[in-house]
Image (spheres, rainbow, N blue to C red):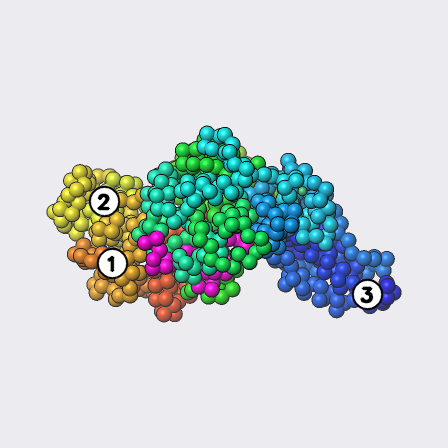
Amino acid sequence: MLMLVDPTRVARRLRVRGVVQGVGFRPFVYRFATHLGLAGWVRNDGGGVEIEIHGSEPVLDAFTQCLATEAPPLARVDVIEPEVIPPDLSCKGFVILPSVEGAVVTAIGPDVAVCPSCLAELFDPDDRRWRYPFINCTHCGPRYTITRTLPYDRARTSMAGFKQCPGCEAEYGHPGDRRFHAEPNACPACGPHLGLFEPHGVRALARDPVAETVRRLKLGEIVAIKGLGGFHLACDASQPDSVARLRARKRRPHKPLALMCANLPSVARWAQLSAAEAASLESPERPIVLLGKQAHFDAVLPGVAPGLDEVGMMLPCTPLQYLLFHEAAGRPAGIAWLADAQPLTLVMTSANPHGEPLVQGNDEAFERLGEIADVLLMHDRDIVVRCDDSVLRVRPDLPTGPGVSSGGGIQFMRRARGFTPLSLPLTDVGPTVLAFGAHFKASVCIVRGREAFLSQHVGGLDNPAACAALDEAAEHLQTILAVRPEALAHDAHPDYYSTRAALALAERLEIPAIPVQHHHAHIAAVCAEQGIDEPVLGLAADGVGLGSDGMPWGGELLHVHGAVFRRLGHLSPLPLPGGDRAAREPWRMACGVLHALGRREEAIERFAARPNVEQVLGMLLRGARCPPTTSLGRWFDAAAGLLGICEDMSFEGQAAMQLEVLARRFGACLPLPGGFYIDTRAQSGLSVLNLYPLLAQLADEDDAARGAAHFHATLVEALAQWIGDAAHAEGIRRVVLAGGCLHNALLAAGLRYRLLARGLHVCEAQHAPPGDGGLALGQAWVARAALRQGSVGGRD
Ligand SMILES: [Zn+2]
Ligand SMILES: [Zn+2]
Ligand SMILES: [Zn+2]
């Protein structure tokens, strides 16, 4: 009690911002303050967490300093704002006060994997939650996908219908407990339960749904498993017949499937694993990590990722997924089994019929998955928000960032579960803008204050269900952030659903809708995530996006400064015989190239098996239905078509991926001499990179792998020179690489290396995907810059 009369006693009020609600931050503050003998209180408020502390100055300093470093695993402290207040000598002890009335949660955490403490309980036969598939605590479990509205508390989640039993309630109410205010807290007595169902909706005859599921998987059956943000379709990866059946039923002949293994030793049997990749796999976000296959992979698991040298793998995330491996291991007690390689390897693919959004509800599952799955493992907790698995790659050449401590940075292919709705920090404040993305790999983004919130990946907007999913994602993001946008941003393409949705909402809210050119947005997305405010030279290496001249662009060199961009150059145009169909049929692109090279006869000979080859060449001759595109993606397709690597694609990017694999297999090679030229005297005044000489040489190549390697090497050389020349001419040293083609690691790493060698600063997308999945971030950033500058969109 010396403290009460201590004249050196001082007091402070601390405001803590970041991800500090629903992550066990208040109990941590309580324990920490109590431990240091500080008096005061902690509570949630609209800005995050508010703390008042009374004590001696050095102790207060130590407390403040350790708030960020000692915070619980899921917390993220962005800012601590201290304020000196008069000490109150009557203040004794430390308490957790009720939340401020009407307080708005600043950030709901993402769903994260079950933590080690919960796993230990899950496999402890004496624990009351032994084998309970919904075990969680403040350090783990679902958040984002079970939350309907703010603030984040049980009544507003899909746990609302499950009243806690006295045992759970006691944990929930005790500040010293790991489950203090763990909103989804549950046990077998009071929480959700599993059920195994036949496809027609009848409950399967099984005493133990987990045991029966594993039995069915081993029989080769396909199981739909309800997860956090959606369903997976699972089968035993070691049974090629099951994998083939899954592909046939899902109408997915070639697109790679992801695998799930119990632990790292099990993953290592199938894939090469660096320390950084291992860390990423084991991170609480549990993403799918793209890994290099082991040499024997395709011999043992032939149907999983055919024709590719990488495979997407993940570790279990939910207690239910762990229970499947636990069952297959013979239900061992304790956690020792988790250190040993386990024989079960599961295919785990998102359960959405071809091109449709993820399945969300139980009734919907019977309707939409009944034809695909042999049996459905479900439960009675609702999925409020769909959220797909995240997919990323560790690139040793990228700067290290969050998620990986060493050995390279991560780059997202798809940003969703585990990361949504975590914000990306921005360098500046500005109006709140909601951006709608484009058409492929759609997602929405809200910029608010100094933060950008990119929604989960929604996918292509090819059907009404997918469009509805985009609306839902936009709606939900506004709800959980409690914002009303001041402006909207959308792609410049008038026919995209995302554009129409933005315009309709703008009219309803009576706020401006700002169109942002597609490739401008690609470059801007990187500027946004990396806090670049200066002018940059941007290479948009992409599939397709509408250019400001009304043409389909996709291989663009842009000068970008905030809301303004200027086109400096583009790739020489390729004809798209038959329009959009040419983007799915690389042989058409090859015909276009052969036609342009004056080698029509050769085209007829090569593609003689195609009944419509004459028709396609006729279109090219007449110039009818052959819009020109500057897309780099189509140059990849044309090369793959010419080399006979891929003539028809069953999924987006297939030709380019196969080309990349062959090039990597062939190994390093030199660029082809005379493979390209840069035309700076084009009528338009733009710099045009012409790759026709390269393709002319590839057309004569009889070794596809050597051709693929030459294509990559020459392309990298050509782009590096093109960019280097422009950088010199413009007096810019910072180069941004963006667009869907940057998913190609060979291209991205090669280009990066060459540009660094020229003394340029190179920035790539890391926290948002480089392709269209990150586009909304760029749109929002540009729109905000436009509002700030009073100039909306366009060229300077
Ligand atoms: Zn836990
Ligand atoms: Zn309970
Ligand atoms: Zn794009």
Which quadrant would residue 56 be assigned to in this image? Answer: bottom right
> In the image shown, does 343 or 404 lie closer to the viewer?
343
Percent across and percent down for residue 456 are 49, 46
Percent across and percent down for residue 102 are 70, 42
Q: Please name the amino acid that badge 1 sits on.
A: Ala
Comes first in the chain, label 3 or label 2:
3
Gap between marks 2 and 1, in whole Å?
Answer: 21 Å
Identify the residue at image location x=58%, y=46%. Answer: 131
In the image, farthest residue toward the left: 601
Q: With 197 as the anchor, is 628 left or right in this view?
A: left
Q: Please name the amino acid that badge 2 sits on.
A: Arg
Residue that label 3 marks: 9
| Secondary structure state at the residue bearing disc 1 | helix
> In the image shown, does 481 or 110 lie closer to the viewer?
110
Percent across and percent down for residue 487 are 52, 43
Q: Is residue 125 visible?
A: yes
Q: Nearer the viewer, mark 2 or mark 1?
A: 1
Q: Is residue 726 part of the magenta span, yes or no?
A: no
Comes first in the chain, label 2 or label 1:
2
Residue that label 1 marks: 705
Q: What label sits on residue 604 in the rendered view?
A: none
Which quadrant would residue 18 be assigned to in this image? Answer: bottom right
Identify the residue at image location x=86%, y=63%. Answer: 1
Gap between marks 1 and 3, in whole Å?
Answer: 74 Å
Residue that label 2 marks: 588
Q: Is residue 284 part of the magenta span, yes or no?
A: yes
Percent across and percent down for residue 569 are 32, 56
Q: Which residues are magenta?
A: 274-300
Q: Is residue 438 visible?
A: no
> In the image shown, does 398 or 194 lie closer to the viewer?
194
In the image, farthest residue toward the right: 5
